[in-house]
Image (cartoon, rainbow, N blue to C red):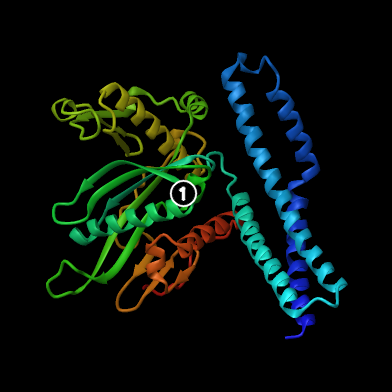
Amino acid sequence: MPREPLVLMLYQQTEILEAKVKAVLSIFDLQAQRARLAELEHEAGNSNLWNDPQSAQNVLVQLNSLRSEVDEIMGFQSKVEEAQFAIEFVESDESMGMSEVSSIISDSLSILSQLEIALERWEVKKLLSGTYDECGARLSITAGAGGVDAMDWVAMLERMYLRWSEQSGYVTQMVERQVGDEAGLKGVEMEVEGRYAYGFLKGEKGTHRLVRNSPFNSKGLRQTSFAGVEVMPILTESQALPVAAKLQIPEKDLEISFMRAGGKGGQNVNKVETGVRIVHVPTGLAVKCTQERSQLQNRAIAMDQLRAKLLVVLEEQQAMQVAEIRGDVVKAEWGQQIRNYVLHPYKLVKDTRTGEETADVQSVLDGAAPLSNFITAHLRLKASGLSATLLHEKEL
């Protein structure tokens, strides 16, 4: 293959990505952000900074976050410049052999491919502009209609989100697992720790519907089952304090009950009712905590969870105060699903909100790239402000 078409291919790809990087720079304003970074570095070097630990912590968080982003943007520029240099180098030396030309261009195209992926990730992060999007996430999955199949479906979703978290670089911690009587799980709760975990996962909240030939039916009949997914932000101490002050919840609005816990703490947790369940009576929102050995600790954690859940609903319903929240609880059953996973009689995963779909069901259930595509599509839909209602949608 002549060298000219290879150089042209690299040139065209470089031009496309150079334009994207310029667009990023116009949004990010690298010069202004470098100036802000210098200010934060100066502030961090002040010997009196740690006189106020909370303020110092905020400065360091801002500093590390901005430094990371500035380095990322400069990396974008660097990759484009590498490709441009490769083009100039190949064009300036006509005596270069084809094997060497092909090698240089192949390496440059590989770098540009990495740049394209990095630019897409950066774009997605810009969609995560919510107040708590940078937080970790507490993910709860509960079996809905469908009996044993629904409990097995919970176990499948647990595996899917664990694998997605691992592939996305997040650390997961299991909080609670309720094993099903015959198979699967009645419910599971996990924490996904890492930056933007809540921002990415918040769109997974809702009912997930599975259609397949049931392995628990002797005749192997087609079975539809449902599972409900809830997602809440894990608030840091600096975030939780102002939220607690803002969301003052009267004691009369709470229904508190206690239960035996099954978490860490030895035999004591099985003898004493250390577990706490709190229901916010006006809205019907409920949380429970059984992870600590002390009832007092579990109650404090449950209150933080309740505030986080109320924050999520306030944002979703665009309410200004807790009193304005509508208490409409969506059940994990037919007609409520946000996403359908069909394994039989054909293979298809389709999101009812965005219209995003794929026939690669196994990759979705493995938490691989297609699942990230569904998450990203929903983020873009929310950012665009378009209606999520799909009219005249044919039921799967």
Q: Amino acid at mark 1?
A: Lys
**Residue 112, located in which quarter of the rendered image?**
bottom right
Residue at the spot x=49%, y=59% of the render? 372
Residue 149: % across, % down: 22, 62
Above/below status of 131 relative to 128 = above
Residue nearer the viewer, 317 or 84: 84
Quarter of the image for the C terminus: give it: bottom left
**Residue 224, located in which quarter of the rendered image?**
bottom left
**Residue 196 relative to residue 178: left or right:** right
**Residue 54, located in which quarter of the rendered image?**
top right
**Residue 276 relative to residue 358: left or right:** left
Quarter of the image for the N terminus: give it: bottom right
As drawn, the residue found furthest toward the bottom would be 1
Residue nearer the viewer, 357 or 256: 357
Residue 240: % across, % down: 47, 28
Identify the residue position indicated by label 1 in the image: 202
Above/below status of 352 relative to 43 = below
Residue at the spot x=32%, y=24% of the render? 297
